[in-house]
Amino acid sequence: DAGITQSPRYKITETGRQVTLMCHQTWSHSYMFWYRQDLGHGLRLIYYSAAADITDKGEVPDGYVVSRSKTENFPLTLESATRSQTSVYFCASSESGFRDQPQHFGDGTRLSIL
Amino acid sequence: GENVEQHPSTLSVQEGDSAVIKCTYSDSASNYFPWYKQELGKRPQLIIDIRSNVGEKKDQRIAVTLNKTAKHFSLHITETQPEDSAVYFCAASIYSGAGSYQLTFGKGTKLSVIP
């Protein structure tokens, strides 16, 4: 479904460049999340946000910056990309942060850093 | 923090047979356990979830069981079909502070259903 969209779907960039991945949701969900997915590691949480202007670190936050000025958008920025950040990035959202709220994922961004 | 172990990492079954994937978790405070299916190149999609006040939940050919004492939960797929071939992820919720929860995911199980 189109409730949560990510852009771009594919991105190739070079080491040292800044790159921003976009995430937009139309459900008015309070919570949004960024994960990276690498072979052998499953999904690992980078950052999450409980509401506009509230963000917090996940398991692997180093090298990433997030912001949430509007409820519907949650961009992820790699300020100086490194090869180790080559990955598939998924954005997700949930209605609230309560323990039993499911998360719904976007289609992902495949990022390659040369 | 929470640690979620998932086994096996790969599983091949004949069409029509059953498939079972098992997960264990470390944080006894976890009480929400979703399962996601991810087809190649696609997004993870929630297929079933269970809360700690329930021991088993079924949805057609899919069922999940939870043993809170042993801290493990399992996904059961009966009468498997080729379209069940995918990577399956289990997850457990953990408290992340300020009244909110995160999900910790297992590393995934690649299920192949052989026609």
Image (spheres, rainbow, N blue to C red):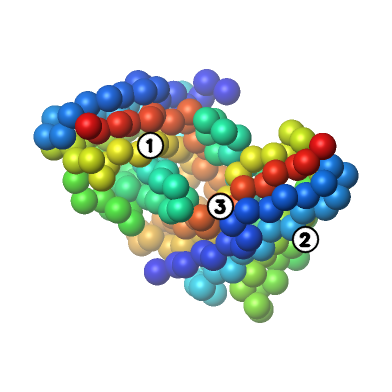
Per the image, the residue denoted by label 1 is: A89
Per the image, the residue denoted by label 3 is: B108
Q: Position of residue A81 (x, y in %)?
A: 18, 37
Q: Do residues under tags 2 and 1 come within 8 Å of each other at their CB atoms?
A: no
Q: Secondary structure at mark 1?
A: strand
Residue type beneath disc 1: Tyr
Q: Nearer the viewer, mark 3 or mark 1?
A: 3
Q: Do residues under tags 3 and 1 come within 8 Å of each other at their CB atoms?
A: no
Per the image, the residue denoted by label 2 is: B56
Q: From the viewer's perspective, is B108 left or right of A50?
A: right
| Crowd class of label 3 (few under 14; some 14 to 19; many from 20; radius 10 Å) | many
| Crowd class of label 2 (few under 14; some 14 to 19; many from 20; radius 10 Å) | some
Image: B44 above or below B3: above
**Quadrant position of the C terminus of chain B in the picture:** top right
Residue shown at 56% from the left, 45% from the top: A102
Residue shown at 56% from the left, 52% from the top: B108
Residue shown at 46% from the left, 62% from the top: B94
Residue type beneath disc 2: Glu
Residue A60 in sight:
yes
Residue shown at 65% from the left, 77% from the top: B70
Q: Secondary structure at mark 3?
A: loop
Image: B57 above or below B112: below
Q: Nearer the viewer, mark 2 or mark 1?
A: 1
Q: From the viewer's perspective, is B17 left or right of B86?
A: right
